Image: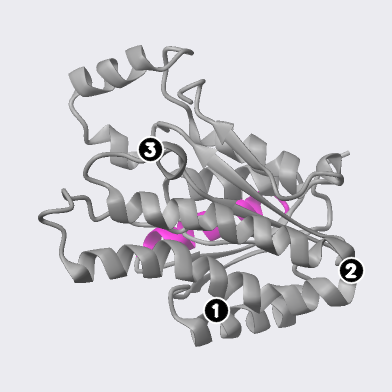
């Protein structure tokens, strides 16, 4: 029995990295997948085909979750196309790193808007259908940086810490409707972004992690499967660190 059979998930920012890993794992677990992407049309088409080849229904939507109306439209389209929204994974995010002395107001605002406001926008867009069906799992992607902070990432840390407070509040508000809200805080995960780093840098990072290696997108995807499935039906308002013991 597949763990997510007949469920439908919205996954934001799914054409690469962690989001892509989650989308593939969800499809393998029998979940229908509606995913968003920003600009990479070719990557979206390729992912859509890869997911449908796994025997589930899948569709990519070019959508900017940082815009309130776009999030509302997305939820409406997914509901029309798929019939239900059982799981929401707010994964889309950006970085605009700089020391506080040098960071511009627009770089601060942009990171808060894409990383944090998008979580509000999409959560607000899906809670009505979830309340109607009296079931739902919301999984928000924070970061180890949201828990411990990092020099040169004040904007990113603020956005990722904000996600945790937001998610706990949603858990308290919607628990009586059987809607669960949890957070995953990834550590250092091997993605296209880390592939650009110097090998020495990666070795140094790995050495500082108790498990002595970088995580893989599948490690995050497995945690998402658990929190999306009925295996975690009594878990809400929690932050699960998937970081190899960094914290």
The label on residue 202 is: none
Look at the image and say whether residue 106 sits in the magenta stretch: no
Secondary structure type for disc 2:
loop
| Front disc: 2 or 3 | 2
The answer to whether any part of residue 83 appears in the image is no
Residue at x 87%, y 67% (from the top left corner): 177
Residue at x 68%, y 49% (from the top left corner): 27
Residue at x 68%, y 44% (from the top left corner): 238
The label on residue 71 is: 1
Range shown magenta: 40-56
Q: Position of residue 184 (x, y in %)?
A: 58, 43
Dividing the picture into quarters, in which one does residue 222 lie?
A: top right
**Upstream in the sequence, badge 1 or badge 2?**
1
> Looking at this view, is 3 or 187 the one in front?
187
Q: Is residue 212 above or below residue 14?
A: above
Q: How is the image coloured?
A: one colour
Dividing the picture into quarters, in which one does residue 165 lie?
A: bottom right
Q: List the residue tagged with mark 2.
A: 134
> Looking at this view, is 202 or 43 the one in front?
202
Per the model, the C-alpha gap separating discs 1 and 3 is 26 Å
The answer to whether any part of residue 237 appears in the image is yes
Q: List the residue tagged with mark 3.
A: 191
Per the model, the C-alpha gap separating discs 1 and 2 is 21 Å
Secondary structure type for disc 3:
loop
Q: Is residue 107 above or below residue 236?
A: below
Dividing the picture into quarters, in which one does residue 140 lie?
A: bottom right
């Amino acid at each position: 029995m597949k763990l997510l059979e007949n469920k439908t998930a919205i996954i934001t920012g799914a054409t690469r990295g962690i989001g892509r890993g989650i989308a593939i794992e969800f499809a393998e677990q029998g979940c229908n997948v509606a995913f968003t992407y920003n600009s990479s049309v070719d990557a979206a088409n390729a992912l859509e085909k890869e997911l449908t080849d796994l025997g589930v229904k899948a569709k990519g939507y070019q959508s900017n979750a940082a815009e309130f109306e776009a999030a509302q439209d997305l939820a409406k389209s997914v509901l029309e196309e798929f019939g239900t929204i059982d799981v929401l994974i707010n994964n889309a995010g950006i970085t605009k790193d700089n020391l506080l002395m040098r960071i511009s107001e627009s770089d601060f605002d942009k990171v808060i808007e894409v990383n944090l406001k998008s979580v509000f926008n999409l959560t607000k867009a899906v809670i009505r259908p979830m309340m109607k069906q009296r079931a739902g799992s919301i999984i928000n992607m924070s970061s180890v940086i949201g828990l411990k902070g990092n020099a040169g990432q004040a904007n990113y840390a603020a956005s990722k810490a904000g996600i945790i407070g937001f998610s706990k509040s949603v858990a308290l508000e919607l628990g009586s409707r059987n809607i669960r809200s949890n957070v995953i805080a990834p550590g250092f995960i091997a993605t296209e972004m880390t592939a650009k780093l110097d090998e020495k840098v990666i070795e140094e990072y790995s050495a500082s992690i108790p498990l002595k290696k970088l995580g893989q997108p599948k490690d995050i995807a497995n945690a998402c499967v658990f929190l999306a499935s009925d295996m975690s039906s009594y878990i809400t308002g929690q932050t699960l660190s998937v970081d190899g013991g960094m914290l």
